[in-house]
Image (tube, rainbow, N blue to C red):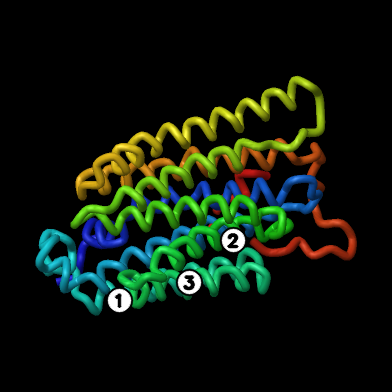
Amino acid sequence: MRPSLRDIGELVRAPAALSVVGDSLAGLAAARAGTPTALRGRHALLPVASACLYLGGMALNDYADRHLDAVERPERPIPSGRVTPRGALGVGTALTAAGVAAAGLAGGRRALAVAVPLAACVWTYDLVAKDHPTGPFVMAACRGLDVLLGATPGHLRSALPAAAGLAAHTLGVTVLSRGEVHGTTTRVAGGVAVGTLAGAAAAAATAPAAGSTGRRTAVRWTTVAAAGAYAAACLPAQVRTAVTPTAGNAKAATRSGIQAMVPLQATWAARSGASARRRSWPASPPSGTGCGSWAVLAARQG
């Protein structure tokens, strides 16, 4: 029997792909800050590339965990028999190839220079590093590269702070997630909570914006409000876990950390707007300038 679309959607966690959209927005906002680079219609493929790489990683995750899931999560597509291991590997491979191809079409060699390492990190994490001490760092690299993938139409260097901020948050969430079964420690959970506070403060620290006083005030308060929403979304659960480092609290803190990605992405996008000079974007690249290359919504920022 061939798996149904519903089975494939469950295998790749289809709705969760929306969580990577904000990475590209944050990266693009940073890359656009003060940069009169034009955006083209093909840059809309960058979020598609990011989503494909993410969904492929989810399929590879279940392929790698199929023996463990047969014991702990028998209802999942592979252990339940709805998707074969070979089929899951094929889905992961096809989506990875589609993601890299979409990046190449969107931004050429510049986008491929980010998409290929991103794909390599996804495969490395799922098949090799997940249970290794380096696993959280590989996962953090995936998120940071996803931000840079969205920044490729502009200056990648401008997006490095946003990439670092989201990578650091991902590192903390991944470390904390390792305590979902047997519990974590006060030291680990407390360290993650401190990292959340530091990340919120760093993202909220905006540079003076160009434009009117009203615009500067609005942008600054938007950034601060988003940073506050980020801290409020995940810090309470992290503090509870630091006080009582049980498996249940660690799982709840991990879940809240994943949900906090959205306000954190919004914070970095707003922060980039605070430091940008207000410039119009030309309809086509200046003479002698390539329009460039592209983890995820370039066109919408145009």
- Tell me if residue 199 can be seen: yes
Given contact means CB atoms under 8 Å apart, are the residues at marks 3 and 2 in contact? no
Which label number is shown at residue 180? none
User: Which amino acid type is marked by label 2?
Assistant: Leu
- Comparing marks 1 and 3, which lies closer to the viewer? 3
Few, some or many C-alpha atoms within 10 Å of disc 3 (few <14, some 14-19, many ≥20)? many
Q: Quadrant of the C terminus?
A: top right
User: Which amino acid type is marked by label 1?
Assistant: Leu
From the viewer's perspective, tell me whether residue 286 is left or right of residue 125.
Answer: right
In the orientation shown, which residue stands out farthest toward the right?
Answer: 287
Q: Quadrant of residue 126?
A: bottom left
Look at the numbered disc 2 and give the secondary structure of its residue.
helix
Q: Observer-nearest residue: 26 or 264?
A: 264
Which label number is shown at residue 149? 2
Residue at the (81%, 33%) spot, across then down:
210
Given contact means CB atoms under 8 Å apart, are the residues at marks 2 and 1 in contact? no
Q: Observer-nearest residue: 284 or 77?
A: 77
* Image x and y of residue 288, in percent: 88, 65
Q: CA distance from mark 2 to mark 1?
A: 24 Å
Residue located beneath label 3 in the image: 119
* Image x and y of residue 4, in percent: 21, 62
Note whether 162 is above or below 212 in the view shown.
Answer: below
Q: CA distance from mark 1 to mark 3?
A: 14 Å
Few, some or many C-alpha atoms within 10 Å of disc 1 (few <14, some 14-19, many ≥20)? some
Q: Observer-nearest residue: 222 or 224?
A: 224
In the orientation shown, which residue stands out farthest toward the front?
Answer: 187
Of marks 2 and 1, which one's residue comes earlier in the chain?
Answer: 1
User: Which amino acid type is marked by label 3?
Assistant: Ala
Residue located beneath label 1 in the image: 89
Few, some or many C-alpha atoms within 10 Å of disc 2 (few <14, some 14-19, many ≥20)? many
